[in-house]
Image (cartoon, helix red, strand yellow):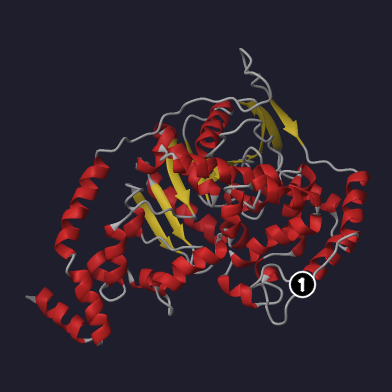
Amino acid sequence: MQTIEVLKQALSSLDPTQQQQLLVAGSAVAVGGLLTCYYWVYQGTKTKRIPIGDGWWGAGEKPQSEDEKVFPFQVQTSDEEIQDLYDRIDRTRYTEPLKDTGFQYGFNSTYLKKVVSHWRHQFNWKKQIAILNKYPQFKTNIEGLDVHFIHVRPPHREGQRVLPLMLVHGWPGSVYEFYRILPLLTNSLDSLAFEVICPSIPGYGFSEAPHKQGFDTLAAARVFHKLMERLGFSDYYLQGGDWGSIITTNMAQMKPECVKGLHLNMLTNKMRGFGVLFSILIGRYLPWLVGFTREDVRRLFGSVGFMERNFYEIIRETGYLHIQGTKPDSAGYGVNDSPVGLAAYILEKFSTWTDFNNRDLEDGGLERKFTLDDLLTNIMIYWTTGSIVSSMRFYKENLKTNIDNRLDNNTGVYVPTGLAAFPNELMHVPQLWARAKFRNIYSYSYMPRGGHFAAFEEPQLLADDLLQFVKKVEKL
């Protein structure tokens, strides 16, 4: 009876339009209940792992045996490389922006000139190389590719427990995204610290690009498992955002016995169809009925409604995805040849994906969370390695396998999972939706601030959430 009274009170508080919307959705509740039950039963019968497989991505044919040596690596440059950069910058042709457009049309050229002036006259690439080389870096050949990685061991502290952890970046980032969070994880005064391995995805930065078609997140997941095995680790923790989120999820699906825990700061939604539609229709008005929290409602609907906050925003922000998922080489050649074009293309993402409201600002809000030196260091990794085209191809490879209904979409994740939901992420995924894929959620955190590049923007917040998750798993 109490439940009925609560429902009556909730209905009476709605205006006629809202009541009509609720009645339309309510008419499907009975069917929805049956479909939901079917959904969970059906999902429970799915396979609990994806095949490991094998591959060869090097030039030429696969040899009978692979060279498994791990050798040191350091970033280097030359005066000729720097002068070539300056010459290209000096020949840049700019287009004047439209009046009062901010970043709504992309990177505002008025502010771009300021960034380029800093790049040309203040930015010191040799100094930044010294910063890049402060952590031990290595390469090793896996499946025909020289895979680059950073490997940082914590200082010995009596009584401190040390656990292996792999951090995986995404696009348009690099391992440099982790330089703020590395000391927080490896040099902690807590009872727990991490031995951290940060690989560059093949085709990104200092890792060799695949020479053959088909290198997707499943291939990257297998390569990274082989890397950890080569380094002597039999079980380890994983953390990722952007592509790193998908790669580490695939790693957990591929070899769950090796993954002690999975922590993500970009969540993917596997829940589909009626379940999502029903929760969207009902959730704004009766969130408790569908398992939403008030924070879920705020992030999903905001003040503009679900379609505007999510669907239309995603349309506005995924033009790059359609280009890179179909014809990456055509677009890539231009930005691979022009350093200023490359900077505009990449840095616009660091503006908008940090906060959609940055599109209204002439400077894109870039220096609110980042320094120009940090942003340009990431650009220089792409520029000096010429890896922008191969990084863009990763989208096409994954689009192809998704169209073919790849197996990992139908496989749950059963390892202990921690999810950090940052408020300015491209799309909010409530825990209700996340459970459809992640079956063993140990922690789900509504982060107080931050966007897509969590390790780069809010390293302390991410480190703290990762630490509390691992402590739950380890029962510390």
Asked whether, in this view, residue 208 is left or right of residue 442, the answer is right
Amino acid at the residue labelled 1: Tyr
Residue 25 position, x and y percent, is 22, 70
Residue 293 position, x and y percent, is 32, 69
Residue 55: name its quadrant.
Answer: top right
Asked whether, in this view, residue 381 is left or right of residue 252, the answer is right
Residue 360 or residue 27, whichever sits in front: 27
- In the rendered image of this protein, does residue 310 appear above or below residue 219? below
Q: Quadrant of the N terminus?
A: bottom left
- In the rendered image of this protein, does residue 350 appear above or below residue 406? below
Q: How many numbered badges does the structure rendering display?
A: 1
Residue occupying image coordinates x 61% and y 50%? 324
| Residue under pointer 1 | 111
User: Can residue 17 be seen?
Assistant: yes
The crowding category of the residue bearing disc 1, from other C-alpha atoms within 10 Å (few below 14, some 14 to 19, many at least 20), is some
Residue 281 position, x and y percent, is 29, 70
Residue 122 or residue 409, whichever sits in front: 409
Residue 459 position, x and y percent, is 59, 58
Residue 124: name its quadrant.
Answer: bottom right
- In the rendered image of this protein, does residue 266 appear above or below residue 290? above
Q: Secondary structure at mark 1?
A: helix
Residue 302 or residue 189, whichever sits in front: 302
Residue occupying image coordinates x 79% and y 45%? 384
User: Can residue 157 be seen?
Assistant: no
Asked whether, in this view, residue 176 is left or right of residue 265, the answer is right
Farthest residue, direction left: 1
Residue occupying image coordinates x 64% and y 41%? 200
Residue occupying image coordinates x 90% and y 63%? 121
